[in-house]
Image (cartoon, rainbow, N blue to C red):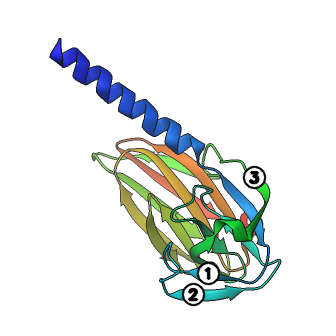
């Protein structure tokens, strides 16, 4: 009986985690009036930029931490935090079910290898599971991950952000090519 209670408890925790992850949304937004872009979700944090009224931002999570939400300043590609009440949430971005133009190759390993090919003229940031990777223009980055579901963001200066969730299978290599057409 004790084993069954533990199993029910873990299933409860698992489904609550799924509900919490599913509740997070990403948006395009604009700054309502002059605001600071902070490094962390605190007014005591370093200021990364000053954002004037109508500045375009990409809100990577609408869930506030200390009253702040995580954003990407679209002009520069800098990621930081803005006080939630200072943002007009203009358009909800639907999560992409799969990375566009992704190819799979089989390998003999327990890990997953993801190669990002940046075929643009911009340096981009690829954020996956809260780890950031800088991919310079016209280059590639090889990333080793554990199998499973991964949340990702791809963004950069004057580049339309890409967001999604991808299930990466054990023993597979993945290759994703990004062109200027995807990012604008």
Query: Which residue is identified by label 1?
Result: 37
Instruction: Indicate the quadrant containing the C terminus: top left, top right, bottom left or bottom right.
Output: bottom right
How far across and down, in percent of the image, does residue 158 sit? Answer: 73, 78
- Tell whether 24 sits left or right of 131: right
Tag 1 and tag 2, C-beta contact below 8 Å: yes
Vertical comparison of 51 with 90: above or below: below
Q: Quadrant of residue 160?
A: bottom right
- Tell whether 56 sits left or right of 45: right
Q: Residue at x 83, y 77 (%)?
A: 54
Vertical comparison of 3 with 113: above or below: above
- Residue 179 in sight in this render: no
Residue 139 shows which numbered tag?
Answer: none
First in sequence, mark 1 or 2: give its number.
Answer: 1
Query: Which residue is identified by label 2?
Result: 48
- Residue 135 in sight in this render: yes
Question: Callout 2: 10 Å neighbours few (<14), some, many (20+)?
Answer: some
As drawn, the residue found furthest toward the top would be 1
Q: What element does badge 3 sit on?
A: strand
Tag 2 and tag 3, C-beta contact below 8 Å: no
Query: Which residue is identified by label 3?
Result: 92
Q: What element does badge 2 sit on?
A: strand
First in sequence, mark 2 or 3: give its number.
Answer: 2
């Amino acid at each position: 009986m004790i084993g069954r209670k533990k199993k029910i408890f873990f299933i409860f925790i698992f489904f609550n985690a799924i509900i919490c992850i599913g509740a997070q949304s990403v948006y395009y937004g604009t700054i309502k009036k002059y605001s600071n872009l902070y490094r962390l979700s605190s007014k005591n944090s370093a200021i990364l930029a000053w954002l004037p009224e109508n500045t375009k931002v990409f809100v990577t999570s609408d869930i506030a931490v200390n009253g702040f939400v995580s954003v990407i300043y679209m002009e520069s590609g800098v990621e930081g935090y803005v006080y939630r009440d200072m943002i007009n949430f203009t358009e909800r971005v639907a999560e992409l079910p799969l990375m566009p133009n992704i190819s799979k190759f089989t390998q003999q390993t327990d890990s997953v290898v993801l190669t990002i090919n940046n075929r643009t003229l911009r340096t981009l940031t690829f954020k996956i599971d809260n780890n950031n990777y800088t991919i310079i223009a016209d280059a590639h980055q090889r990333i080793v991950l554990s199998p499973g579901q991964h949340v990702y963001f791809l963004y950069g200066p004057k580049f339309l952000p890409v967001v999604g969730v991808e299930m990466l299978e054990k023993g597979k290599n993945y290759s994703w090519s990004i062109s200027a057409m995807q990012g604008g």
